[in-house]
Amino acid sequence: MIVRREHPEDVPAVRAVVAAAFQESAGRIPVEVVLLDRLREDGGWIPRFSLVAEEDGAVVGHVVATRGDVGDRPGLGIGPVAVRPDRQGRGVGTALLHALLGAAEARDEELVVLLGEPAYYARFGFVPAAEHGVDAPDPAWGRYFQARVFTPAAPRGAFRYAAPFGDL
């Protein structure tokens, strides 16, 4: 498996992976596909933080982080994270997240947040965001809104995702 930056020609394959990973019913486009399309058009899109996992020349996974903010300071919001169903449980998502987190830290990002299962994301150093003084856009998210900080001086306050997240 190779994890690399997404290329423009990967977009259709990425859309297919996200659709397959989040498919709820036949014929409906998952909201995550629509979100990804809108994120690509938004000022919060950061191409270097859109990564694919490739096996035998095929895209089998994707992760993206987009620009958000905590107060007047930047942060990254991760999501969606998608792995083709026939490749789930085989380390693809783990490889994508490790690569994304390494890239974010290498680019001097101070923090990343995501909404997800605490038992799964703890292995990547995520804890409930409130433990770092970062408030969720929706307080009902509770411990599922998680953060990983890369510096003790990471910002505190309310996190705001890129605009397309607010349209969901």
Image: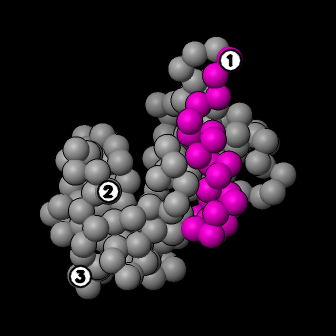
Tell me what residue is drawn at x 45 percent, y 68 percent.
68
Q: Examine the rendering and report whether any part of residue 33 can be seen.
A: yes
The amino acid sitting under disc 3 is Pro
The amino acid sitting under disc 1 is Gly
Check disc 1 and report the residue beneath it: 27
Q: Answer with mark 2 or mark 3, whichever residue precedes in sequence.
A: 2
Q: In which image quadrant can residue 132 be found?
A: bottom left
Which of labels 2 and 3 is toward the front? Answer: 2
Q: Examine the rendering and report whether any part of residue 60 can be seen.
A: no
Q: In which image quadrant can residue 131 be found?
A: bottom left
Check disc 2 and report the residue beneath it: 137
In the rendered image, the vertical position of residue 113 relative to residue 84, given as above or below: below
* Distance between the alpha carbons at the discs numbered 1 and 2: 31 Å
- Which color scheme does this rendered protein use? one colour
In the rendered image, the vertical position of residue 136 relative to residue 48, given as above or below: above
The amino acid sitting under disc 2 is Pro
Magenta-highlighted residues: 27-50
Q: Answer with mark 3 or mark 1, whichever residue precedes in sequence.
A: 1
Looking at the image, residue 161 sits to the left or right of residue 20; the answer is left
Judged from the image, the secondary structure of the residue bearing numbered disc 3 is: loop
The mark found on residue 72 in the picture is none
**Magenta stretch holds residue 130:** no
* Distance between the alpha carbons at the discs numbered 3 and 1: 46 Å
Label 3 packing within 10 angstroms: few (<14), some (14-19), many (20+): few
Tell me what residue is drawn at x 36 percent, y 60 percent.
113
Label 1 packing within 10 angstroms: few (<14), some (14-19), many (20+): few
Tell me what residue is drawn at x 66 percent, y 35 percent.
17
Check disc 3 and report the residue beneath it: 152
